[in-house]
Amino acid sequence: MGEMRNEKRGDETDGGPRLKTSLIRSALSLARRHLVFLSLMLFIIVMPFWAKPLSRPLGIPLVMVMRMVGIYTIVAVGLNMLMGYAGQVSLGHGAFFGIGAYTSAILTVKAHFPPWLGIVMAVLVTIVFGFLVAPVLRLKGHYLAMATLGVGIVAFVFMREMTWLTGGNDGIRNIPALSLPGIRIGEARDYLRAEYYFIWVIALLVLLLSSNLVRSRLGRAMRALHQSEVAAEVMGVDVSWEKIKVFVLSTALAGLAGGIFAHVQGYIDPNLFTIVLSIQLVTMVVVGGMESIWGAVAGAGVITFIPKIVEALPKWLGEVPRWVEKYSNYEGMVFGFILIVTMVFMPAGITRGLSDMVRYRRSPFVNPFRRKAMG
């Protein structure tokens, strides 16, 4: 009995260290699983401290640009779930972004809603519009792309012509700065940094929730839809309802990003939400990497930063040669050339290329001229 009691006491004594070891292992496992998220969060926290002194010599307002990267990340995540995971093409997400921006701007300027409530209403209104537009999801392939393109054009015309509500081409001015109940974020002394952290807290939450969502039942249904709608239906997936769910979710995120955008900009007009914006959003998803939540961050960063870098090139390299100045929009040409090179040599997107480089220790670039092996 005495020996048994001693053994039991020994087990109880060892319980503390074992529990500690178990907790440490669990924490390490959790950190390893969310390594990308934790690395991004750390980068976002420290970025303003070293970015501000670098902005002047580089000629790029880094914190200001990173605010826009955060906003575009939110809408690109939603579009990536729709296009990358569910395989439904949309060329009209610029319209939902605009609807969100106009909803919050109108409610705060004309009805004197607080900005945070305006953003919430922007999400709800874009959800309603998402349901109204959802019937176009019966179409497939390029027919669906053309239908969503039409949605974008119709929304742009309404924004421009409904002058009694949207101000027409003059737009809406004096949109109040971002704020929460009792906290005036956009009126802080260092408002750029305050807005930057506010936007990225929301963007990180969206990323975390989305990365969990794509592992859920809805995520598996989305992947099944992407592979084959017939096969998904045979497996018991309600194809129509799942397509509507992911479409409405992506429009809600576009509305959220649009609402924040209106208060960060302080002024909006219809020309900010043309078809060009929709194409830019699609480009972010493709360049960053389809079927990758983190690809949205990479795509939003690349597409937002490249024009700023091209604009800053004369400051880095000296005066632009006279023959280049002849092409007034040479920035656009350089931007397009970079995109073409990226897509030719990294067709799976930046995220997939870099991920393969780390995992398989191989170059992220592929040779487009290499012949495929005969199967």
Image: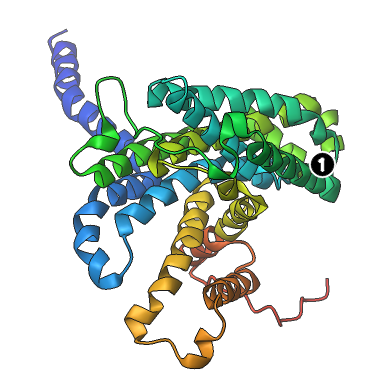
Front residue of this view, candidates 372 and 156: 156
Residue 220 x/y as whole percent:
66, 34
The answer to whether 291 appears left or right of 145 in the picture is left
* Left or right: 334 as drawn, with respect to 36: right
Task: Return the residue nearer the eye: 246 or 188.
Answer: 188
What residue is shown with label 1? Answer: 228
Nearest the camera: 154 or 247?
A: 154
Q: Position of residue 36 (x, y in %)?
A: 40, 49
Disc 1 marks a residue whose amino acid type is Ser
Do we see residue 34 in this rendering? no
- Residue, x 64% and y 50% (percent of image)? 274
Label 1 element class? loop
Q: Quadrant of the C terminus?
A: bottom right
Q: Residue at x 54, y 64 (%)?
A: 353
Q: How is the image coloured?
A: rainbow
**Can residue 137 be seen from the camera position used here?**
yes
Identify whether 148 is placed above or below 130.
below
Identity of the residue drawn at 58% across and 39% down: 98
